[in-house]
Amino acid sequence: MAERKIFGTDGVRGTANLHPMTPEFALRLGRAIAYEAGKGKNRPVRVLIGKDTRLSGYMIETALASGICAMGGHVMLTGPIPTPAIAQLTQSMRADAGVVISASHNPFEDNGIKIFGPDGFKLPDQAEAEIEALVEGTTLDEARVTGDKIGDAVRVEDARGRYVVFAKSTFPNRLTLDGVRVVIDAAHGAAYRVAPTVFEELGAEVHALGISPDGTNINAGVGALHPEHMAKEVVARGAAFGVALDGDADRVIVADEKGNIVDGDAIMALCAARLLKQKKLPHGTVVATVMSNLGLERAIKALGGQVIRTAVGDRYVVEAMKKGGYTFGGEQSGHLIFLDHATTGDGVVAALQVAAVLLEEGRPLSELAAAALTRVPQVLENAKFARRVPLDAMTRTQAEVARIESELGDRGRVLVRWSGTEAKLRVMVEGEDETFIKTAALGILSAAKTDIAD
C-alpha cells in the first residue's frame, strides 16, 4: 500500500491557513475527491460537505466546493452539523462521498478534513493514499471540464432536521424522556442546535451549555475536553445526567446525577451489559482500543463476553467491527460506535443509549456506572524526544517492559507507543499497586532516554 503523507489517523489536520490546511490545498483535494468518487460513473459526482463552527470553516468549505465543481461535481452544503450526521446523510442521500471540515476536539486555530465513502464509513487507508497521489500528481490537470460540464453547489436546508429525525430513531420507541432533566454541553461546536433539539423532542427538560459559537470558542473550556463544567451544572440543577460533546460531536463524556464523570470505558461496560442481556451483542464481543482500562475486559468477561483490542483511533475500531461481524465498540475518550445505528462514533446517539439504560433499569446513573465497571489503576506518562527510534530497536526499553510485564502477570498491562504526530513516547501502565505502576512508567521512559541517546 502506498504510504500516506498528509492523511493521519483521522483525515487531514493542521493549523488553518498553513499547509496542508490551506485553501489552495483544499481546492486540489476537492478535485481529487471528485475524481476518485466519480470513477466508473457517467454522471456528475455528488458530494456532501458539512463542517463545525470554526471561523476557518468558511475558507476551507468554499475551496473544497470549488475543487469539486471544477471537476464537474454537484456539491451539497449542510453548514454546521455533527460529523456522524454527514456519515448518515451521505448514505441516506445516496451521495458518492461525504466530507467533514473539522478538527474535532482541537482548538479553533486548527482545522481538518475527513472523508466518508458512499456507505457512510470513513475511507480506508488505501483510498486516502490514492487521493494523496492524485493531489501530488498530474492526472487532475488532464481531467479538467469546461462549459456546461462545470459543476454546481446547493444548500441542503433541512440537513439538521434530517439528522434530528435519525438520532431520535435510535432511541427505543417504547420509552420517553418526559420529565427527565438533562444538561447538554455542545462545546460551541457542530451539535449546538441539534443535540438540545433531539433531547427536547423526546420529552427531556434540557439545560444547554456551549450553544453560542462565535467561530473562535469551539472546545474552549467546554465540552468533552472539559466535562467538569457540565458536571457541576448537573448537580446544581438536580439533573438525572449530563452530556458533554466535543467540537464535531462524534464523541461524548457523561456525568451522573452526583457529578461523577462517566467516560467511554464506563459507557461501554454499561451498554454492553444491556446488549448482552438483550442478546444483541454478536459473538458477545466489545471492540476497544489498547487504551481502554483492564477493568473493562474484566467486567465484560464477568458477563460472559469478551473484549478485543485495536490500535488507537475510532477508524480502527470500526474496521475490526466490520471484519469480525461485531456491532459495538469504542474508545475510552468517548468515541462510541453502535454499528446497528451508525457507521462512526456519534455522541448524541451514544448519549441516547445511556438514557435508555437509565430508564429501563430505573436506577440512578451513579449506581449503574459503579456496578458496571471497577477500574484498575492506570498511569499515563509522556516524554518528548529529539527523534523517533523504532520501538523494536530500543533494546533497553523492551527489556524494562518485559521485566515489568513479568511482575504484573495477568494483574496489569503495559503499553508503549509513539505519538502519531510528534516525537513523543507515550507509556501506559496498569496494575493494582499505584506506587509500583508510577515507578514502572517512569522507569520505561528512563530506559527510552538511554536508548535514544545512544
Image (cartoon, rainbow, N blue to C red):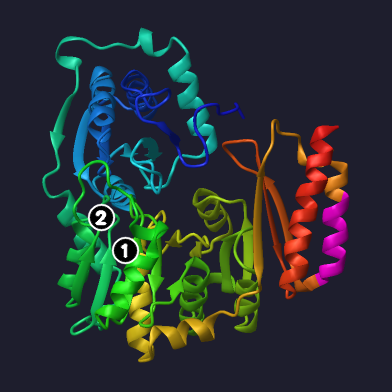
The amino acid pointed to by label 2 is Ala
Give coordinates of residue 105: x percent, y percent: 40, 49
Position of residue 271 relative to residue 167, above or below, is below
Q: CA distance from mark 2 to mark 1?
A: 9 Å
Q: Secondary structure at mark 1?
A: helix
Position of residue 320 relative to residue 35, above or below, is below
- Would you say residue 403 sits in the magenta stretch? yes
Q: Is residue 352 visible?
A: no
Give coordinates of residue 240: x percent, y percent: 30, 82
Q: Earlier in the sequence, mark 2 or mark 1?
A: 2
* Quadrant hosting residue 113: top left
Give coordinates of residue 19: x percent, y percent: 42, 22
Q: Residue furthest bottom?
A: 362
**Foreground: 223 or 77?**
223
Q: Residue furthest left?
A: 157
Q: Secondary structure at mark 2?
A: loop
Q: How many marks?
A: 2
**Foreground: 142 or 349?**
349
| 57 left or right of 8 in image | left
Position of the N terminus by quadrant:
top right
Q: Write down the residue under mark 1.
A: 348
Q: Is residue 164 visible?
A: yes
| 125 left or right of 235 in image | right
Q: Are marks 2 and 1 in contact (CB under 8 Å)?
A: yes
The amino acid pointed to by label 1 is Val
Which span of residues is magenta-colored? Answer: 399-409
